[in-house]
Amino acid sequence: MSEDVLKIGAHTFRSRLFVGTGKYRDMDETRAALAASGSEVVTVAVRRVDLGAQSGESLIGHLLEKEYVILPNTAGCYTADDAVRTAKLAREMLETDLVKLEVLGDERTLFPDVPATLQAAEALVKAGFTVLPYTSDDPITAKRLEELGCAAVMPLAAPIGSGLGIRNPYNIEIILQHAGVPVIVDAGVGTASDAAVAMELGVDGVLMNTAIAGAKDPVRMAGAMRKAVEAGRDAYLAGRIPKRLYATASSPLEGVIGSTQG
């Protein structure tokens, strides 16, 4: 795995688990869970975090001190203009070209507003951002975002925070077949097996928050997610056996001296 790195734009990462920072009980739990996850990339909601508070006791201060790569996101934005303004604020405050683009279309489902996401993505790419857009699992939309210049695409597995796992693996597989940029599953993971399944499909990474922060033991779950992502990636690279309807012997008799057939 030493040479198996994830490249997004000009950035290179060894961990394929991206984690969020919301919903933890306190800062101590946040710090411990982030460390247990092994993640290099931590996403923060620009509209919900004080980016100017960069002391060691603050969330941003801790992330900077531990040299995490901060991925600001535009969570809570419902228009393209709002998302673009929020991304530019993050770039000014954090001096990063990275942005996780979210333009939501509905407060209940938190599904993305696809036309507004495409509009915002185009504007941010032109403004020099490395854009990672949260989107639906529609292969056509994923391809459009790539064509606009996005550095990755981030299709949802299920509604944000639902913990339902991958509801439509076939769409994810279609996205993977046609993608020329990294595909990162974003939203819907509930437990370690969900993360492993996503990685076994061949996605390049998984982003999660609620699945870790909402667990009874977030620190332990963070460690489990780290192992699941690594195991799923290894299994994908190893290449699984084909599925068969009937049994095939683990120790076949063909070629064994003295074996009889018929």
Image (tube, helix red, strand yellow):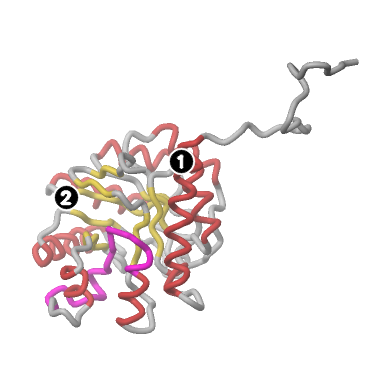
Determine whether 29 is above or below 261 in the image.
below
The residue depicted at 19 percent of the width and 82 percent of the height is 57
Label 1 with label 2: CB-CB less than 8 Å: no
- Residue 61 quadrant: bottom left
- Pick the front one: 127 or 106: 127
Determine whether 38 is above or below 26 in the image.
above
Residue 67 position in % (x across, y down): 18, 63
- Residue 149 quadrant: top left
CA–CA distance in space, label 1 to label 2? 26 Å
Q: Which residue is mark 1?
A: 202
Q: Which residue is mark 2?
A: 129
- Pick the front one: 42 or 164: 42
**Mark 1: which secondary structure?**
loop
The residue depicted at 35 percent of the width and 54 percent of the height is 134
Where, quadrant-wise, is the N terminus in this rendering? top left
Q: Which residues are magenta?
A: 34-53
Where, quadrant-wise, is the C terminus in this rendering? top right
The residue depicted at 18 percent of the width and 77 percent of the height is 50
The reply, left or right, for residue 113 in relation to residue 228 is left
Looking at the picture, which amino acid does disc 2 mark?
Phe
Determine whether 195 is above or below 62 in the image.
above
**Mark 2: which secondary structure?**
loop
- Residue 18 quadrant: bottom left
Residue 49 position in % (x across, y down): 23, 75
